[in-house]
Image (cartoon, grey):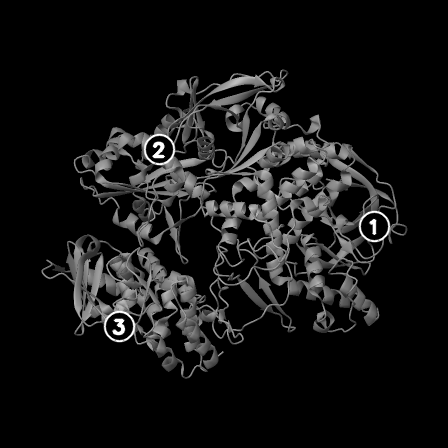
Amino acid sequence: MGDDALAALISEAKQISRADSLQRISVIFQCIDHLLSLEDSTRGYEAVGVLRTLPIFPTRRGEARPTLQTCERHDDWFIADQPRLLETFYGRLNMLAFGAEDLARMSRLFCALHIEDRLLSTAAICKPRQGLASVVREDYKRLLLSKAEYLSCLARNHGSQPSEVSELLRDIEVQSVDEVIVEWAVLYPSEYIIDTHEDTKLALIVREDNRVQLYIRHIDADADNLPFELCEQLSELFGIPSQHRTLLWAALLLNDIELLREALGPGNIFRTMSLEWQQMAVRSEPSGHRTQVSFGQSERDHSFETGYTQLDDQDNVSIAQLTDSHYQHRVPRFTAEPDVIFCSTVEELPDVDFEGKTQEGQKTLPARLQMLNTGMQTLFIARSSTTLIDHEPAFLGEVFVSEFLGHVLGSAYDPNIHWTSHFRNRLGHTPFRAQENSPMSGFYIDARTGQAMTDFLRTNSIEGAAAWAYLPPDYRIDVQTTVDGTSASFSWSPLDFDMARRWRIRGSSHQQDHIYILIRVSNVYGKDPHVRMFVDPWGMIQQEELLIKAPSNLVASIPDSAPLGIELSTFQSKIPQPRYDPFSRMSRFLGSAISRQRSKDTSNVYTWEPLNEAARQIRLLYLLPGKGTEDLRGKLTVSTIRDRPEYDAISYTWGSALHPFTLHTSEGIIPITTSLYLALRRMRKRNKSRWVWVDAICINQSDSVEKPSQISMMPDIFRSATRVYAWIGEEEDESLAVLRTLEQIDHAVPSRGGDEVIPRLGSTFWDDLGKLLERKWFRRIWVVQEIVLARDIIVMCGNQRVPWGRFCDTLSRLFYHAEQSSSGLFLSRGSTAGSVLRLAAFRKACWEGGDFEAKYQLLSLFEHFQWTEATQRRDKLFALLNLARDNCQELRPDYEAPLKDIIWRYARTFVNNGYVMELLYRSGRSAISPSWVPDWTSAPYPRSLSKWRCKTAPHKFTAGNGFPLSFHLRSGRVLCLRGHLVDRVSRVGKCPSYTSVFPAYRQEISTMVDKWFRARTPEETAIVKWRLPIGDCDIESEQPRTSGNLNDAWAGESREYMAAASDFADIFSPAVACGTEMRKVGIVPKNTQTGDRIAVFHGSVVPFIIRKTETPDGHYRVIGECYIDGMMHGEYMDSSGQCLDISLV
């Protein structure tokens, strides 16, 4: 790419019109900028000049619609090349309508167009207002000099020497003032100056006439640290780029220069460079066609010409085949060879979007190129990111605190004002618009409302609160929620961190203008979530009771040894006696308030009356009408399934165990979760009552006798419901637009050429659809039986309702389209998002005869629904019972016994029912005791070598099934099986089959074969090398090579072979190569050790690795299945010596 490519892009730019999107224009400009950096674009800068006079530059003022302007002097507009300048002049000046990141990638273009004078960093002049009363602060200057080493550490990375940094710091004059009031002036391109406005800043550095002055507030000059805004300006002064400023600021605050040194490698170069430039490419087209930029497809692109399939086409698919799609998705995939572009530097790599978004046809995935010393090169590409952020815990935590504040502050609290987070939108409050560079704390209580908060603190004897009552402070409440326990780390915004410092309690002063409060909500999804409140977290930092780390972003944690305050729980009776420190007292008062809010009056809490199990009684909720945020009201009545009452059932996710809301009944209030509150609010009618069944209200969850009894009745409860409403959550992440698009696709008839109505794969629709299908409802274990058993289902998202059948049929059509067009990179049936189709297909199979029929064994269901999640691990066992054909009394739910006892009861039942080998095939993968029992509650579910399709007829392994299975259980949970100890492991490989080292794993297999088979011919060795990595898989088109060189031997491998090798190794999770005493080679689990025995049990199709225990009773522990070449088809059963009873524990 050179001058020709640049000419094509310039021609493209000339045709920009109002019909083009900002994204498209930005891409064109960025491509031109990138080509200007290439050496072969020698005349590029002159050629670009023709664009100056064309109206192709989108500009706007504030929220106004963009208009196209030229670069001529009469068109006054600017380039906000720094985020803080965009914030300062937003709505005041006409600015180029691109974000800061895009603008950073257009610097060469601006230079070629000679419009650097439009950069606000050049055109905007900031000076202190004349007449500011100031005080010279030599002490603060000494503080700056003490930080010279920190600044030099980064500045030398960008051209400044340590001596220059120290010299410039010594020349700074520090002036402290009450407020840093500044005046902005802007030089317009039309060459006149306009004074815009006054503003206030935390700090200002002014450099003119070889003189540098720093203006800073008195309050900040008295501190021991530098405010973030000053850190920014110092970085600017010394040429430190913006992406390193947060790291510098954190190191300065924590007084820890090691943070900087750890980030720098040899020569003081950053170990990880920022991905600043995107790799761009253009392809030329025949004359008459517009050049297309590889960032995305033009709006004029035609739809992909593919067909689609309805879910009905899967009627003949078995449950095993449906499950296989999940396994195939989780192992590495090998697709058609991509174009490979080598970049000269890391900066030229394209930016990876770790939230999985696509923009204008582009989806950039993270990748690594691995090169072995043998010369083998392998490119690893992550199909989806594991760093997706789950915002649900943060939402649940803030909802809880909002309800608490409503109780404490009463009518003075207005969530539309005081809840300063976008999460409030989801509860129906007015949308919140966050200002750039503003703290992200959840709540702001102003001074007027602060009187109520101060009264609350004073009433509860919080130290110092009485003095605050005369001049109430503002309160900033920061809510930090984690899924894990109280000492778990949480991310802290640098802006919030700085505000905690600035709003700290200053000594014993009677007047405090600002108070910062941290509320920690932890274990939010657990049975006992905790809520703790801390006043003045900055004081905790100083006392090392709140620990801060800053590798790149601030991460905080409260250690167990810190005064954590009182743990809060649902019931007031659990609140312990107060301890005498301010944190504990605050937590006690918060706990008391929350408990009162939950129960209002403990004597008015609803009391469940026992149900008559023999009469098959159930409770139904009579939900009274209401609207908006009005209290939920209703009445619980008892009915029987036999009476066939009319009601609707609700399927939803429980979410957090926190109960910030209440359902009001005449017999008392019932605390409910946020998720259920939102669902009932949507189910409630405005002018008419309705009957509903919902588990959290209609089942007494604290009754360990009633709960399992009602669970056993769920088939009848859901089959008897008039309709089941699947509540998947409120509208967010463009879910409304997604559902409307699904409706359009459902109503459209696909043309013969393809599904033109389906959005193109480059559109944001696919990202938004993925977010919808990744919601927790689709992964909840209890949802399976609720949907499978229901006769009629309505999917409900916000106020949108879609029939289940139409929803799934349309999704099937979309998945087919995506998989055919993009190899499953946008959507795949095997992914978590595809779980809805697996559920739909299973439901269809169960209702094939017109009524529900339990067709499958429970063990099969464990595997098929392994992708589901449960709050309690035992629910993974209980939630599928009503769908299994082998459900029996021995498998009944039990919420009192320890989990290990329940698993043993299930294992004993399966053994008694003849499924002993089904247990053994999946065993050895977990810490569960006994070792021959698999962990059915784990995800992913253990795979089995017994199901592998091999090349040798009958296309399955037959290691020991020439003998009848013989087994019995002994006391002590010992399983005795008849079998043979056929060999012993003498060598175990060191390279497991992890994806990141998969080539090394394959290389080790080849090396071990060479060492063990030295006496064999090259042809025989080549056959084993070929067969071993794929477990003798049936790949007819592949032929082994006889070359001894690994690269030559594998040079002709197809992607089918590579995929089979990866899939085979995944069974062992992970695998390693091994050699045996009988000069055999094989593939075994990673935790295999030298000396382990290889056993073949009668009736088993595969051998096992077992390990003798240290006890003298001769028992063995199961390590797992294994593949031993030459031992998979009964070859050693006749000559393996004496048949034994092998005892497994």
Q: Nearer the viewer, residue 669 or 464?
A: 669
Disc nearer the start of the sequence (3/1): 3
Picture coordinates of residue 419, whole percent (x, y): 32, 40
Q: Amino acid at mark 3?
A: Asp
Q: Nearer the viewer, mark 2 or mark 3?
A: 3
Answer above or below: position of 215 versus 567: below
Picture coordinates of residue 790, whole percent (x, y): 61, 32
Where on the picture, by quarter, is residue 166? bottom left
Picture coordinates of residue 793, whole percent (x, y): 58, 34
For image coordinates 29% across by 62% down, the residue present is 232
Find out whether the residues at labels 3 and 1 contact each other: C-beta distance under 8 Å. Answer: no
Where on the picture, by quarter, is residue 195? bottom left
The residue indicated by pointer 3 is 117
Q: Amino acid at mark 2?
A: Phe
The residue indicated by pointer 1 is 959
Answer above or below: position of 889 versus 219: above
Residue 404's disc number: 2
Where on the picture, by quarter, is residue 545? top left
What's the distance in space between the residues labelled 2 and 3, CA to CA?
Answer: 53 Å
What's the distance in space between the residues labelled 3 and 1, CA to CA?
Answer: 80 Å
Secondary structure state at the residue bearing disc 1: loop
Q: Please say whether residue 1015 is visible from this viewpoint.
A: no
Secondary structure state at the residue bearing disc 3: helix
Disc nearer the start of the sequence (2/1): 2
